[in-house]
Amino acid sequence: MYQSTITITLRPSILDVQGKAVELGIHTLGMKEVENVRIGKSIQMTVNAASDDDAKRITEEACKKLLANSVMEDYSFTIKKL
Amino acid sequence: MSASKLKFGIVVFPGSNCDHDAYHAAKHVMNQDAEFLWHKEPDLKHSDVIILPGGFSYGDYLRTGAIARFSPIMNEVITFANNGGIVVGICNGFQILCESGLLPGVLLRNRSLLFSSKHVNIRVEHSESRFTNDLTAGDILSTPIAHGEGNYFAEQETINAIEENGQVLFRYCDEFGEVTDGSNPNGSINNIAGIMNKNGNVMGMMPHPERACETQLGSADGKRIFESLIKSFILQTN
């Protein structure tokens, strides 16, 4: 059994309007040092797999087929043996 | 297609909320046959035209249209479209068509971050399609929009291709037909409001023509898109 933790973000070339709005909020708080706020999604799931490679392969397939849309999003993930 | 009427199949997903508007427009305004198609039943029931209606299928979870795309009926819709069948996606239906790969691109969050519900003007780009053949390039249609994710985006290469192929059918415009940034309600690239696939049998648009088929509703301009579609079948038969 493995735990996959997937992070999905808008591709860098896409204006992240949510991120911009949040950045404005942070600046309003006085934290002018903060820049490039990007909003993404974090997805956790357990994967019944026989090996690290299997867990990676299954997670990768779920990302490609459903969890991320490659037209607008990038994804990365980590796996941990439970 | 029966003797003289087209059959519109309107797919109902959990969370669809414009299915009855589409049914009403097809059946009662356009006087055609219409039937609801439950998303779990992979049967298009001999429909001539499939409509993926507006709404919030699966609560818009993950991404708009992303989960509806895997409903059992969608395999049938994709096969139907790949065999030349006519498929129209309105609002959430457009998002589902993009997620399923039947149309290029994707619909991002509106530039304003706000859900936008109002009447907008859209300009007809050309009449060389079965969705616009009863219209004229430059015609301005008043149609309602109601969406939070209608900001059409695709890679520049894809945008160039769909522009060159004449796949852009409708653009947001002002009351004079000028395509301006001020008349763009969501930030769509090139003010794109509606496109078709390269083969010309699949069309998606964010505005709701089915909600603008009677003057009592504020506009009957949407009817002209349905009239074009019906005319295209008549031309095909003759």
Image (cartoon, helix red, strand yellow):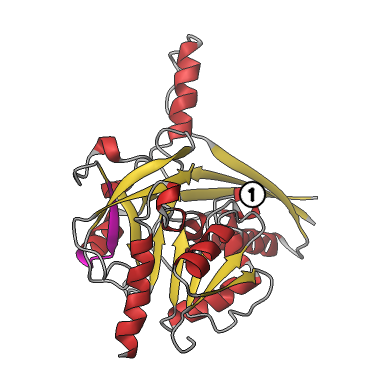
Q: Of residues B31 and B145, which is closer to you in this image?
A: B31
Q: Is residue A4 above or below residue B86?
A: above
* Residue A33 appears in view: yes
Q: Pinpoint residue B215: horizontal percent, then vertical percent.
A: 40, 51
Q: Report the quarter where the C terminus of chain B lies.
A: bottom left
Instruction: Judge left or right: residue B220 versus residue B65.
Output: left
Q: Is residue B170 magenta?
A: yes
Give the residue displayed 55% in from the left and 49% down from the top: A76
Choose top left, top right, bottom left or bottom right for residue B126. Answer: bottom left
Choose top left, top right, bottom left or bottom right for residue B185. Answer: top left
Choose top left, top right, bottom left or bottom right for residue A64. Answer: bottom right
Q: Pinpoint residue B26: horizontal percent, then vertical percent.
A: 48, 68
Q: Of residues B231 and B91, which is closer to you in this image?
A: B231
In the image, what residue type sits under mark 1? Gly
Q: Of residues B236 and A49, which is closer to you in this image?
A: B236
Give the residue displayed 46% in from the left and 34% down from the top: B113
Give the residue displayed 49% in from the left and 18% down from the top: A25
Instruction: Judge left or right: residue B129 versus residue B29.
Output: left
Q: Is residue A71 above or below residue A12?
A: below
Residue position for label 1: B59
Q: Is residue B29 magenta?
A: no
Q: How many marks?
A: 1
Q: Which residues are magenta?
A: B164-172
* Residue B197 appears in view: no
Q: Pinpoint residue A31: horizontal percent, then vertical percent.
A: 48, 12
Q: Secondary structure at mark 1?
A: helix
Instruction: Judge left or right: residue A80 versus residue B21.
Output: right
